[in-house]
Amino acid sequence: MDKFTSNMKVADLVEANYRLLGVLARVGIDGCFGEKTVAEACAQCGLDPDTLILLCDVYSHPDFKPTVEMLHRSHVGDILRYLHQSHDYYLNCAIEEMEASTSRLLAPCTKKQQEVFWDFFRGYKVELKNHFGFEEEEVIPYVQDLMIGRQRSGFSIDRFEENHSNIDEKLSDFKNLVMKSLPPVCDTMERLQLLLWIFALQEDLKCHTYIEDHILVPMVRLLENPQRYRERARAQEEEAEEHLELSAREKEILVSVAQGLLNKEIADKHNISINTVITHRKNITRKTGIKTVPGLTVYAILNNLIDINEIE
């Protein structure tokens, strides 16, 4: 698939991945885009084109990973617009259609079968409403305040991560129940229609969650502390320079780990944030294939990064 750019036509974007029609609708670009380019369509609805391309990349490239520079160029307000409209679509369209389809599918089932199935489905619906309700009532207003320079005490994006539940597991169970547990008496075409809705929602939620975790959260962290932009950019530059070998900074962090320092102590020692320390440690594990502190300590000694006498 060719790289998406703001100069390409919106129609070509959709031809590359028809699922982007839903993304476009959520950010204000309707289906009547004619021969407009992405930049022209974005200008018409007050949308940042870099942000739209970022969203489209997530939905179209399974291995896509945004760089700090991409996040820096994009507009967090447009991410919030996408998230808000996605919540509305999930609750007022996708779930409602699934509920109507479920009702038709369960019609020939026994009363007991219907009751247990409805209990499960409605439990998931409540879980979904609570999940998005927290984001609408707490997270989005918090980020909007940050955008105008107003910091709200008692809340940070860390709290969002702590409360960010997995909304895919129960949906996956629901899908398997529809496929494997409902009796053959249920209408075949109705079962197929419901499964199509479930699979589509599952794929969409996967992208939605990725956008929250890997785009919104880092962007908000940069708003909370602009210094993180420089730290994350430096860490990514080092990773790009040496894909297999540890960078100079990663070796320093590895030595600190081998010396028994905690993340907070490592951050203070090297004058970086704890999140940057965690990023470096993930890269060290990925490159060395070693996950435990004792294992990393042995690695550091064998590679002459630290003397055994320096280990407590």
Image (cartoon, rainbow, N blue to C red):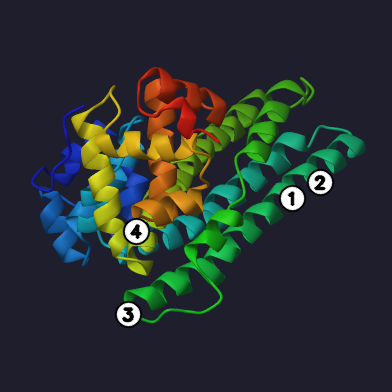
C-alpha distance separating marks 4 and 2:
38 Å
Which comes before the other along the chain, label 4 or label 2? Answer: 2
Comparing 98 with 169, the one in front is 169
Q: Are marks 4 and 2 in contact (CB under 8 Å)?
A: no
Q: Nearer the viewer, mark 4 or mark 1?
A: 4
Task: From the viewer's perspective, tell me whether residue 148 is left or right of residue 74.
Answer: right
Which comes before the other along the chain, label 3 or label 2? Answer: 2
Which quadrant would the C terminus be assigned to in this image? top right
Which comes before the other along the chain, label 4 or label 1? Answer: 1
Residue kind at label 1, given as amino acid type = Arg
Residue 283 point in image, percent of width and height:
38, 33
Vertical order, 38 against 153 (above or below): above
Secondary-structure class at tag 3: loop
Task: Give the crowd class for mark 3: few <14, some 14-19, many >=20 residues within 10 Å.
Answer: few
C-alpha distance separating marks 3 and 2:
43 Å
**Any part of residue 211 in sight:** no
Q: Pointer 2: what residue?
A: 119
Task: Give the crowd class for mark 4: few <14, some 14-19, many >=20 residues within 10 Å.
Answer: many
Vertical order, 297 against 118 (above or below): above
Q: Pointer 3: what residue?
A: 148
User: Which residue is pictured at 45% across the width and 55% down the height?
Assistant: 86
Residue kind at label 3, given as amino acid type = Ile
Q: Pointer 1: what residue?
A: 122
C-alpha distance separating marks 1 and 2:
5 Å
C-alpha distance separating marks 3 and 4:
14 Å
Q: Residue furthest front?
A: 309
Q: Which mark is residue 219?
A: 4
